Image: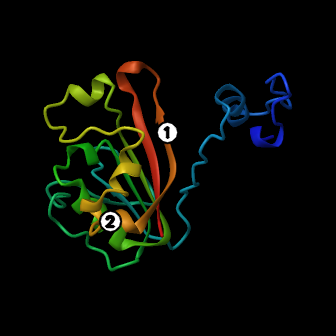
Amino acid sequence: MTVSEIPPGEDGTWFFNEPGNLEDHLRVAMLRTAPRWIDTTPSPGGTYVHLGHGKKLIRGYRHLDFPEWDGNKDKLPFHDGQVDGIIMYHTLDHIANPMHALSEIARVLRLGGVFTNVVPHYMSELAHSCLEHHHSYAIKTWFNAFSERHYEHGASADFRIGFNMVMGFEERNLVLVTQLIKK
């Protein structure tokens, strides 16, 4: 079922098929198609990287964290187009120069490779309660960053926005969950 397949009647009433999953419920409630996330399960033989892992190690991923890798200035230790997927959880907001980190991520990702990123949403308590947060992120952050002139020499031309949604279990810890795809 998609909303666009069942236009409203003359009186403006919408008619829908039975919602079968959460995505269908979102379509009915929000009158729009929910973004689809990309499966990032590591493929055998692929190269997957977890940046800023802290104490969260994930099987199948190579792990890089500060001080071995400083996202503000260091190059990622991979050849161009060598990496299949990169993840960052609550890390990009701690990097003062995120365009450098994004440029490096774009450099090492293969075409079609996915960068999955989770950062606090700017309206959450989480975004404002840490003195080490350098930037705030909103649902339009990626659209704006990738369309601004002053970013044209960075990673902006290398990504398209895939999944991009604000999520949370409570208002105080809303996060922006984004998947950027290397184009």
Q: On residue 92, which mark appears? A: none
Residue that carries the numbered disc 1 in the rendered image: 165
Q: Which residue extends farthest front?
A: 10
Q: Position of residue 90 (x, y in %)?
A: 31, 41
Count the labels in the image. 2
The residue under the point 32% across, 39% down is 137
Q: Position of residue 56 (x, y in %)?
A: 34, 45
Identify whether 119 is placed above or below 11: below
Say whether residue 122 is left or right of residue 4: left
Q: Is residue 57 visible?
A: no
Q: Position of residue 22 (x, y in %)?
A: 68, 32
Crowd around label 1: few <14 · some 14–19 · many ≥20 (10 Å) = many
**Observer-nearest of 107 and 142:** 142
The image quadrant that residue 35 belongs to is: top right
The residue under the point 73% across, 34% down is 24
Q: On residue 155, which mark appears? A: 2
Q: Position of residue 84 (x, y in %)?
A: 46, 68
The image quadrant that residue 39 belongs to is: bottom right
**Observer-nearest of 76 and 136:** 136
Q: Is residue 88 visible?
A: yes
Identify whether 38 is placed above or below 129: below
Which quadrant: the N terminus?
Answer: top right
Colour option used: rainbow
Q: CA distance from mark 2 to mark 1?
A: 21 Å
Q: Amino acid at mark 2?
A: Ala
Say whether residue 90 is left or right of residue 81: left
Comes first in the chain, label 2 or label 1: 2
Tag 1, which secondary structure? strand
Tag 2, which secondary structure? helix
Say whether residue 148 is left or right of residue 39: left
Q: Amino acid at mark 1?
A: Met
Crowd around label 2: few <14 · some 14–19 · many ≥20 (10 Å) = many
